[in-house]
Amino acid sequence: MRNITLMVFYFIFSFLFSQDCDPGYTEINELCFHEGDLRVLQKLIDNSYQSGIDLGCEEWDPYCGSPNPFMDADDSWMWVVVDSTYFEWSGDQDGIVEPLELGLQEWNNGRLTTLMCGAYIYCQLSGTIPEEINQLTEIETLRLEGNYLSGFIPETLCELQLEEADYLQFDLTANRLCPPYPECSGEGSDFWYQDTSSCTNIGDVNFDYSINIQDIIQLIRFIVNIETPDYQQTVASDFNFDGFFDVLDVIQIVELIIN
């Protein structure tokens, strides 16, 4: 009888003091986190895994990989601050980096306000910046410098309320991001220092480092809605930089090829 009473008391106590998250938030470790913010973190991780970047890793090196596999280790140095309280959650060692294991983070009222994944933190992110980056509507500090991020920067980045000139608040320096850059990025500034050696030219719609008939065919497929381009393909298709991909882009690519 005593054991039954204790069990009933336990369930009542758990019910009264359990975390009840609002719609759009999910409970992790008895705390609430915004699902949109978590999706952006997951997308950064997924893009890194899918990039196929070769970092020349040796089997004995637990820090080599994209994203850095050490962030999933039980002795990872990454931390998360939630409403001014520090949490040093060790990785779950399942071989996959998860959103709350990515870099140094600060959350307030369930929203991500700081993501530190830049130099000396060694997140080793690669692939493209997700177009959904604008979902981080409460972000105040976004540090992604010194990674291997590549491709075109999405215009949606400009929707974030960040001070682009303040590298302590916002920094994308020393990645592999390709021009043209969004206006909000301060194009032409030494702030960027991008390695563009792997960037392709606008017009190379299929990203094979050559502008040819295959790009024209792919562009026409986009124009007639046989296929829907992603953001990277949309930028590459706008050969005349007028904000659209249409028959004018086809004509100019043809002229480039025959000349």
Image (tube, grey):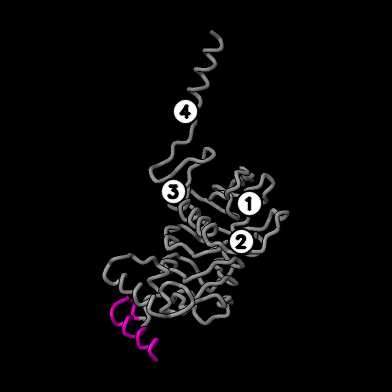
User: In the image as oriented, which residue stretches furthest toward the bottom?
Assistant: 259
Look at the picture and state if 152 lies above or below 83: below
Three-letter amino acid code of the residue under disc 4? Leu
Labels 1 and 3: the sequence-earlier one: 3
Q: Quadrant of residue 57?
A: bottom right
Three-letter amino acid code of the residue under disc 1? Met
Three-letter amino acid code of the residue under disc 3? Glu
Instruction: Identify which residue, 37 or 46, lies in the foreground.
Output: 46
Q: What residue would you read off at disc 4?
A: 16
Q: Is residue 89 visible?
A: no
- Horizontal and vertical percent for residue 10? 53, 21
Q: What residue would you read off at disc 3?
A: 35
- Horizontal and vertical percent for residue 188? 52, 82
Report helix, strand or loop for mark 2.
Answer: loop
Labels 2 and 1: the sequence-earlier one: 1
Labels 2 and 3: the sequence-earlier one: 3
Labels 3 and 4: the sequence-earlier one: 4
- Say which residue appears at 41% left-offset and 66% top-offset: 156
Query: Looking at the image, is mark 1 or mark 3 nearer the viewer?
Result: 1
Labels 2 and 4: the sequence-earlier one: 4
The 10 Å Cα crowd at callout 2, few under 14, some 14 to 19, many 20 or more, is many
Q: What residue would you read off at disc 2?
A: 124
Q: What residue would you read off at disc 1?
A: 71
Query: Looking at the image, is mark 1 or mark 4 nearer the viewer?
Result: 1
- The Cα atoms of the two marked residues, 3 and 4, are separated by 24 Å
Residue 237 among those drawn in magenta? no
Horizontal side, residue 121 vs residue 247: left or right: right
